[in-house]
Image: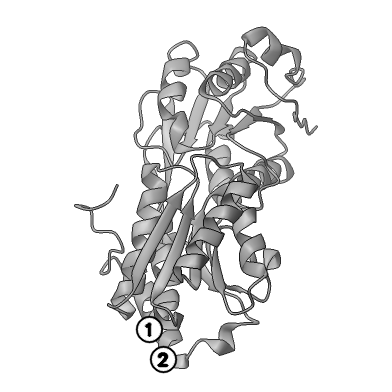
Amino acid sequence: MQLTLRCVLAVGLVSILACAPKPAERGARVGLVTPGSIADAAWNAGAYQGLNRIHDSLGLSISNVEAHTPAEQEEALRSYAAQGYELVFAHGFEFQDLAERVSHDYPRTVFIVTSGRRAKGNVAPLVFRLDEASYLAGMVAGGMTRSNLIGFVGGMELPPIESAYQGWVNGATAVNPSVRSRKIYLNSFDDVAAGREATLALIRLGADMFHHNADAAALGLFQAVKERPELRVFGANADQTRLAPANVLGNAILDLPHAFLLVAGEVKAGKFRSRVETFGLAGGVVRYEMNPALTPSVPAALRARVQAAADSIAAGTLHPVPSDSAA
């Protein structure tokens, strides 16, 4: 049985419980709390796809909640745990402290913080080295830019997002030392209009290559770039080619469904042990993929250089964001 919870959370546990799913009759249950819309075509959509893969592959009951504020997010985590959910995905770096606080009262629930930073008790993080894929995207941008100015739009200045940004810049300058970069943080993952305005501001500065990590707000970036056929953009967290097919050169992708399924399989089998689980290019959960329609526009020598860098990153001999500078 698949349970999907799409109600808007109100402040207060009573409201959370009122719109929460009824307990499943049997079998393990898996909950997902996202900080934004599962229709963002990126970070949250990937998590929702992962939740559905758990249902389809393992036959577990599932439920999801969108919770935008810290108070709502903590209430949602607490609601799932109070109902006896065995596994709850808290989708984002910002959930780390909240999950740890709730876990003290519910030691039997496994809380997985995606892009978290530490394992503690029954709370464990999944760390995604998106900077490895963003580095490769940056290499292409650095080799293809005509203005030598590249732009980045971020939702909030969180460590995983800043790390992906640094990977993007480092990749670009590795190919083209003359490249300059400008970034704008929106302080929102949902404001599509703000994403568009930030992109237009970067265009006015002369940027012609764009990358992002802004979830639904990035839809505004794609809208702005799509109106300018000479501009190029790189998707983040998912294959976003369909958002601007003539402009997307490639995508820095996270295979969230695969990572979610691995964890859920361990929990179902009773074999899960709290730890920091890191995913990068080496395991295939993180990857960079070119848009086949635009690949011929990328010089063969540059494509070969990108592939060589990908091999070196996977082998551990190239570090897109050195540890002493990582956020």
Counting from the top left corner in percent of width and height, residue 304 is at 42, 86
**Picture quadrant where residue 224 is located:** bottom right
Q: Classify mark 2: residues with Cα within 10 Å, few (<14), some (14-19) or many (20+).
A: few
Residue placed furthest toward the front: 204
Name the residue: 68% across, 7% down: 14
In the picture shown, does residue 201 fall above or below 111? below
Whether residue 232 is visible to the viewer of this picture, yes or no, is yes
Residue placed furthest toward the bottom: 300
For this rendering, which residue is in front, 218 or 22? Answer: 218
Counting from the top left corner in percent of width and height, residue 116 is at 41, 37
Residue placed furthest toward the right: 1
Q: Is residue 325 left or right of residue 105?
A: left
**Picture quadrant where residue 120 is located:** top left
Counting from the top left corner in percent of width and height, residue 99 is at 46, 24
**Picture quadrant where residue 60 is located:** top right
Q: Could you say whether the residue bearing mark 1 is in a helix, strand or loop?
A: helix
**In the rendered image, which residue does mark 2 sit on?**
301
Q: Is residue 189 left or right of residue 206?
A: right
For this rendering, which residue is in front, 224 or 211? Answer: 224
Q: Is residue 196 left or right of residue 52?
A: left
Q: Are circles 1 and 2 on residues that touch, CB within 8 Å?
A: yes
Q: Classify mark 1: residues with Cα within 10 Å, few (<14), some (14-19) or many (20+).
A: some
Name the residue: 66% across, 48% down: 40
Q: Could you say whether the residue bearing mark 2 is in a helix, strand or loop?
A: helix
Q: Is residue 320 left or right of residue 265?
A: left
Name the residue: 55% across, 69% down: 233
Whether residue 133 is visible to the viewer of this picture, yes or no, is no
Counting from the top left corner in percent of width and height, residue 251 is at 55, 66
Q: Amino acid at mark 2?
A: Ala
Q: Could you say which disc has been placed on residue 314 in the image?
A: none
**In the rendered image, which residue does mark 1 sit on?**
305
Residue placed furthest toward the left: 324
